[in-house]
Amino acid sequence: MATQMDEQLSMNQVYINELSKHTGQEVTLKGWLYNLRSSGKLLFPQLRDGTGIVQCVVFKKNVQPEVWDALKGLGQESALIIRGAVRADERAPGGYEIDVSSAEVVQSAHDYPITPKEHGTEFLMDHRHLWLRSRRQHAILKVRATVVKAVRDFLDNDGFTLCDAPIFTPAACEGTTTLFEVNYFDEEKAYLTQSGQLYNEATAAAFGKVYCFGPTFRAEKSKTRRHLTEFWMVEPEMAYATLDDVMNLSERFLSYIASRVIEDRKEELKILERDISKLETIVPPFPRLHYDDAVKMLQEGHERGELENRFEWGGDFGAPDETYISGHFDKPVMVHHYPAAVKAFYMARDPERSELALGVDVLAPEGYGEVIGGGARATSLDFLREQIAIHELPEEAFNWYLDLRRYGSVPHAGFGMGIERCTAWMCGIEHIRETIPFPRMLYRLKP
Ligand code: 4AD
Ligand code: MG
C-alpha cells in the first residue's frame, strides 16, 4: 500500500526545463543528486533530471528529521525525488530554485567515480556510461540530437524519401583498405557497410530523391580527432542531378542545420562556450574552389613558409591542408573536381578533363575539415566495369549495381555527411569522440 508520503511525492511531477510554468506551485522532481553543499541548518542539493539542473534549498526546520538525515551527506548521483515550491530567483542558475518540503532517496550512491576534480580523458572514456551525465557531455549530445532532427526535417520537407541501406554488405563502397569483415553463415564473408550510397543509387531510381541514415563502419587505422570506426552518416541521393545540384543542396542543408542548432540549443551552446557568431556565418552561398586553385593556394602557402611541405598536384588533402584551405574562408568551402585517382570508383568524370572526378568535399571552417563528401556518379556501364576492374573489386558482387546502368541509367548525384563531424563543428569541440554516446575507435571498444 502506498504511504501518504509516497502519494504526496508522486503528485504534480514536472521536469526541470518546465519550471517556469510552475512558479509558486508545489511540484515533484525526480532525478539524481548532481552536487550537495551544506551550511549549518541549510542544505543545497542540486538535482538533475535529464532536462536540466536545479538548485534546491532545504531548511532543517521545514522538513521531517528523517528527510534531513537522509539528505545530509548523500552521495553524488544518488537517485532522489524532491518535493517543494518553485521560486523564481534571478541569481539562481536557470532562474529557479526549489524550497524543499519533502524528499525521498530512491537509491543512495557512494563514491561516484566522476567528481568535480579534473580527470584524464582515458579515465573519462573508460567511464563513458557515467560521464554522459556530466553537464558538458549532456550539452554535446543534445546538440547531436538537434543535428539529427534538423537533418531529417530538412530532407523530409524537401521531397526526399527515407530508404535505409543494409549494414551487412557483400562488397566495398569506399575502397577495400577500411573494410570490416564478418562471418556470414556457411563460410560466406560479409562486410560492415562503409556507406549506403550504392543502395541509394538503386532507391533513387525508384523514388527520385532519397536518403539513407544509419551507422557506417571504417576500419580506420588512423588515430585522429576526426575519425571513428563506427559513425553515423546521412546520405541524400538524387536522380537526374549534377555536381552543381549537390553543391546547392549541401549549402542549403548545412545552413539549415546551423540555424536549427542556434535556435534550439541556446543553453547548450552557452554551456559549451560556443562562439555563436561562427555559426551565424553559415549561410548560402558557400565559396566554391576548384581543386586546381586549392592546390595553388597550398603551394603559395608553402612558398610563404606557412606550410612545411610543398603540396603536389594529384594528391589528396591531409588534415593540415584542409585546415589551411578553409582558413581562407569564414564559411564552409566546397572544393570540387578532385583528381579521380584519389576518389572512389563510382565517381563521374569531367568530360573535358577525364583525369578529374565530378566530386566535391565540403570543408568546414575552424579546422573541422571535411564534413561532406559527394558528387556525380558515373552513368556508363562500360566505364564502371572498367573502374571496378582497375580498383580490383569483385565484379560479381557489383552485378546488381551494374543493373542500374543497364536499366534506365541517368545522371545522378548525392553526398554523405558524418553526423559526428558536423556535431563537433556545431559544438566547437576538439574531438569527435564526445559527439556520440559510445564512441568506437582504433583503441576503444568499451564500454
Ligand atoms: O567522403 P566519404 O568517405 O563519402 C562516402 O562515403 C560517400 N559514399 C558518400 C556519398 O556520396 N553518399 O564520407 C562522407 C562523410 C565525410 O565527409 C565525413 O563527414 C564522414 O562521412 N566520415 C567520417 N566520420 C567519422 N569518422 C570517419 N572515419 C569518417 N569517414 C568519413
Ligand atoms: Mg571523403
Image (cartoon, rainbow, N blue to C red):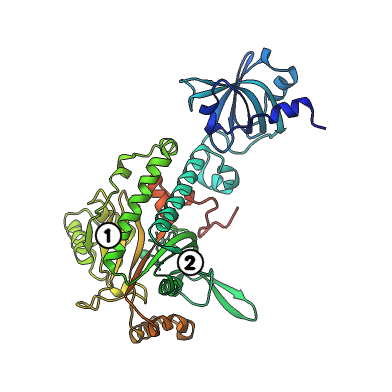
Figure check: 284 above or below 411: above
Decide if residue 280 is in sight here: yes
Identify which residue is drawn at 41% across, 39% down.
Answer: 269
Figure check: 54 above or below 128: above
Q: Amino acid at mark 2?
A: Cys
Identify which residue is drawn at 28% across, 60% down.
Answer: 248
Q: Secondary structure at mark 2?
A: loop
Where in the image, quadrant-wise, is ligand 2 located? bottom left
User: Which residue is label 1 attached to?
Assistant: 334
How many numbered markers are drawn? 2
Task: Place residue 304 in its image quadrant.
Answer: bottom left
Q: Going by the image, does 224 lie left or right of 50?
A: left
Decide if residue 225 is in sight here: no
Q: Amino acid at mark 1?
A: Met
Figure check: 10 above or below 132: above
Residue 163: give its label: 2
In-front residue for pair 286/275: 286
**Which of pointers 1 and 2 lies earlier in the amino acid sequence?**
2
- Disc 1/disc 2 C-alpha distance (Å): 27 Å
In-front residue for pair 35/21: 21
Q: Position of residue 341 (x, y in %)?
A: 31, 75
Q: Position of residue 254 (x, y in %)?
A: 34, 53
Q: Are marks 1 and 2 in contact (CB under 8 Å)?
A: no
